[in-house]
Image: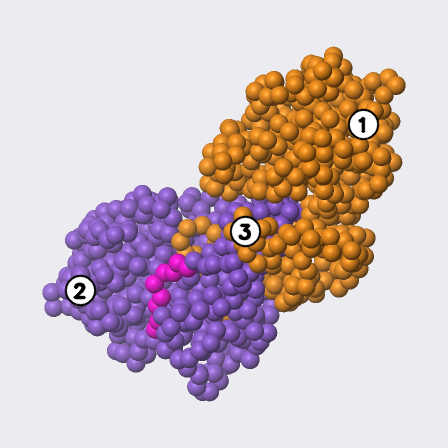
Chain colours: A orange, B purple
Amino acid sequence: MSDLERALQAADDGLDKSLERLFALLKIPSISTDPAYRHGCREAADWLKRDLASLGFEASLRETPGHPVVLAKQPKPGAPHVLFYGHYDVQPVDPLDKWETPPFEPRIGETGGKKVILGRGSSDDKGQVMTFVEACRAWKAATGSLPLGVTLMIEGEEECGSINLPAFLDEAKDELAADAALVCDTTMWGEGKPAITSALRGLIYEELTIRAANRDLHSGMYGGAARNPLHVLAQIVAGLHDETGRVTLAGFYDGVPETPEPIREQWRSLGLDAEAFLGPVGLSAPAGEADRMIIEQVQSRPTCDVNGMWGGYTGAGAKTVIPAEAHAKISFRLVGDQDPAAIRQTFRAYVREQLPVDCDVEFSGHKGSRAIQVPVDSPALAKTRAALRDEWGVEPITIGLGGSIPIVGDFKKTLGMDTLLAGFALDDDRIHSPNEKYDLESFRRGTRSWIRILAALAA
Amino acid sequence: MSDLERALQAADDGLDKSLERLFALLKIPSISTDPAYRHGCREAADWLKRDLASLGFEASLRETPGHPVVLAKQPKPGAPHVLFYGHYDVQPVDPLDKWETPPFEPRIGETGGKKVILGRGSSDDKGQVMTFVEACRAWKAATGSLPLGVTLMIEGEEECGSINLPAFLDEAKDELAADAALVCDTTMWGEGKPAITSALRGLIYEELTIRAANRDLHSGMYGGAARNPLHVLAQIVAGLHDETGRVTLAGFYDGVPETPEPIREQWRSLGLDAEAFLGPVGLSAPAGEADRMIIEQVQSRPTCDVNGMWGGYTGAGAKTVIPAEAHAKISFRLVGDQDPAAIRQTFRAYVREQLPVDCDVEFSGHKGSRAIQVPVDSPALAKTRAALRDEWGVEPITIGLGGSIPIVGDFKKTLGMDTLLAGFALDDDRIHSPNEKYDLESFRRGTRSWIRILAALAA
């Protein structure tokens, strides 16, 4: 038996214990965006630090103005060194009443005949992070050492914009030096179909509050004369798209590359129709730009979505109020060379332009990130591809991803390092939603995949 | 000293005790629309029953499928009999953080040098109801009896549509027989300027939920392809008005009478400009139909307002979600012969027509009410006008009111009785809003006004 085979065997033999550890981590409510869970974030970071220390890593928590970063290092003289990135924080859990079992009480369930791990973070990103940690554990158990040098950097603010991570990267630049960065926060192409992600959309997230009267008004007394900020907000939101699904902001499509026809042809051949992609979530027709294939709509085209909108009376029953304020959270996914700062400015100018007399607007925004393209011809990528092929028995697909992992741009800019994005989540994992899950098979074979990738990159 | 003078004196002498009683009632959280306050509603009803019984009324609680009605009767053989209507329920108190002191801890405060009673219900309608109760008490204290027969019917569901009251009216028709109905739930024309309300707008209140995907989605993964119900809702709301402020629903203005030019002329002469009406609430320009005077916009024209709108992530921070559902509460104020049932139907048809593929909508609505016009030439109205002139020293104004008191239509239909609407609230009382107030002078002189009106109607 080769070292690799022994490590794979160790992972399979230890699966039950691996799940126990994952469940312990999933039980910790580390919702980073909500200050009420500050303690949960630190607890998750501590848990990871202790677990990694038990594997022989020199592990510590690094303080930031927000939640701490877990940094763990285990060098291997003479061998290459990789930097693994993941996050221990999770999304909020509302609407809580839509969860079949409590979000922080993980369990094994069944979906369509498959065993799945249920709970907030099971897929995004605790489950994925633990595939890598368990791969390291298997190597240590089987051979007493890792096949190459490894640094893990597990942050706690990915779900709220990673605002403190760029500064930390800069500060810890020397400690983080490595030959390549690895990220496990992406999806496969489908069940049993591994994928390497080569493109990520960028992100701008804006929150706005529109104010009219200086207090809530009675709609019987003032209705008809008083400006209703909910009407103003609706006009603004309605005006963001035209009837063909295009975003109307001036210059929004500047820097959006046209996908070359050969690649569009390749995408067409993948046979991803709207029914296949949208059917599982109860939809049938793509809602984006009318002249684009659905794969373009979610991967290569920029978008605008309202993520939250509220104002006035939202409780049970009837209240005849004209509210003083209306609120929205609006995000944009960016591609190509779209400039987050310019688009944010255009968006804010558009909103101000739409405001009628007597209204004003207040904005708060999170850091914007550009879209990212990683090289598809590096030796490291070829090795990773081979390792995934060995594990899954099929050729991995190189895909673009609709979501955003801003840190990949910072790895390039600050550390001069390209990133390999390999993940084992599935489109139907309900990340950011109630009843988030991670296929047991994703966890088991994800771990085995990393065991192989580490061996391949060590060679 | 005449009986009337003795009664007025008794009211003035007893003001402190009157306020103590009002505060006791204001302390009871009787929010009728929220099932959590069911007990508070019953407590307020009980309090009124006990207080009225102590004045010699035969008082009881009458059960309905919702909150009970307080019924109290004190006949006076040979004299006319009046039916007084008010409500003991109050509006919800959110946003709670905008209250300077807790809504159910009433106190005397100061606003612009005037003493005011602060607390939820101080104006709408507990404060107004108690002006009438205290007027009865003053008559009893001064003369040992009321100048005429009085029935009080104080309901507990006005703020949630009075859904059970019409059936109760019908059932208790014989007990409620009287020569005229009196309502104290309206405003004065301004400080020191008494008014009799002769027209009330009708109301339709609709709640809708738009559904798209079968669960919340991640906007990175699905953004661009998945239908966002918040966008759909924004389109629907934005389309309800055209750029001149008119409601766009087909046939919406059917049955809206054109105000005769002489009356418009009279309104112009009142000098109610936008600045005067909107300035105190921080607005300057009327937002309604562009070709209408502000007094028309709030009195004689129908309106449409979104009273609440919500969906997606509304907590702190960023969540990149495409929600499965979007919600709105939308109300219409009606005038003239506008038909609530027809408009509700048109509204629902409009919403359904706007729905793109993959979306559906669920409606829930409260009972609609037609607009109401009471006769302005009755002897009772002339007597009331004289009584108000005596108290306030100026000629009372006959006005239309933007709000809705549906029961006035039922008094006519079921009991065959016209209603006299006299109230002492002011436009700036912040009813339905945080920091609701009732001027101490409204309470004191409102009580004195009823003392005089009872004497006038007895004559």
Along the line of sight, which residue is nearer the eye, A22 or A347?
A: A22
Nearest-to-viewer mark from 2 and 1: 1
Which amino acid type corresponds to the residue marked 3 in the rendered image? Gly
> Against B97, is A214 above or below?
below
Numbered badge on residue B160: none
Location of mark 2 (residue): B173
Location of mark 1 (residue): A457
Along the line of sight, which residue is nearer the eye, A405 or A232?
A: A405
Subunit under mark 3: A
> Against A28, is A366 above or below?
below
Is residue A366 among what the camera can see? no
Numbered badge on residue A279: 3
Q: Which element is circle 1 on? A: helix
Question: Which residue is rendered at x = 15% and y = 68% of the image?
Answer: B79
Distance (Cα) linking label 2 and label 1? 89 Å
Name the quadrant of the N terminus of chain B.
bottom left
Distance (Cα) linking label 3 and label 2? 58 Å
Q: Do the residues labelled 1 and 3 touch (CB within 8 Å)?
A: no
Which amino acid type corresponds to the residue marked 1 in the rendered image? Leu
Question: Which residue is rendered at x = 47% and y = 34% of the image?
Answer: A101
Which amino acid type corresponds to the residue marked 2 in the rendered image? Lys
Q: What stretch is highlighted in magenta?
A: B363-372
Question: Which residue is rendered at x = 85% and y = 29% of the image?
Answer: A179
Quarter of the image where one finds residue B290:
bottom right
Question: Which residue is rendered at x = 35% and y = 68% of the image?
Answer: B369
